[in-house]
Image: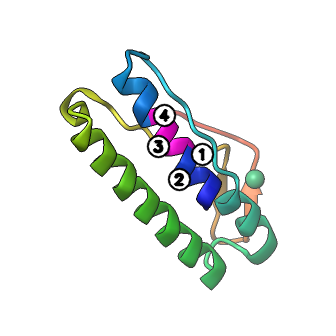
């Protein structure tokens, strides 16, 4: 999580410095989902950690004076079927 927080802080600084786009990747939610399943306590704790990190990130954007002009978009690499506890390789855009 420390590296993720550090990468988010760097992204905030880069955006404040004029970058038009910054992308930060974090693999642990996906990784734990594969290991323990989508409704596991491990996933819940990790999502809470990511939520706290994103809170710090948006606070940094606020401090840098760019929060109102920054869109934060969260993406995932694939979906999951809760009924079968497997990850879907098919995707749809809605
Ligand atoms: Zn995956």
Give the image location of residue 72, x and y in percent.
37, 38
With respect to residue 12, does 26 lie above or below?
A: below
Identify the residue under disc 1. 76
Q: Earlier in the sequence, mark 4 or mark 2?
A: 2
Q: Which tag is nearer the camera, tag 3 or tag 1?
A: 3
Give the image location of residue 71, x and y in percent.
32, 32
User: Label 3 to label 2, Cα distance in Å?
Assistant: 6 Å
**Pointer 3 and pointer 4: residues touching (CB < 8 Å)?**
yes
With respect to residue 52, does 16 lie above or below?
A: above
Q: Is residue 84 left or right of residue 76?
A: right
Specify whether residue 8 is painted magenta. Answer: yes
Q: Earlier in the sequence, mark 1 or mark 4?
A: 4
Q: Is residue 27 left or right of residue 65?
A: right
Give the image location of residue 55, x and y in percent.
35, 57
Identify the residue under disc 2. 5
Asked if the beta carbon under badge 2 is closer than 8 A to the nearest atom of ligand 1, the reply is: no
Q: Say which of 61 and 87 sits in front.
A: 61
């Amino acid at each position: 999580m420390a590296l993720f927080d550090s990468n988010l802080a760097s992204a905030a600084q880069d955006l404040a410095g004029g970058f038009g786009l910054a992308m930060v990747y974090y693999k642990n939610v996906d990784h734990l989902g594969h290991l323990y399943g989508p409704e596991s306590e491990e996933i819940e704790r990790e999502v809470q950690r990511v939520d706290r990190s994103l809170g710090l990130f948006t606070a940094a954007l606020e401090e840098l004076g760019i929060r109102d002009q920054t869109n934060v978009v969260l993406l995932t690499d694939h979906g999951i079927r809760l009924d079968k506890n497997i990850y879907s390789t098919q995707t749809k855009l809605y």
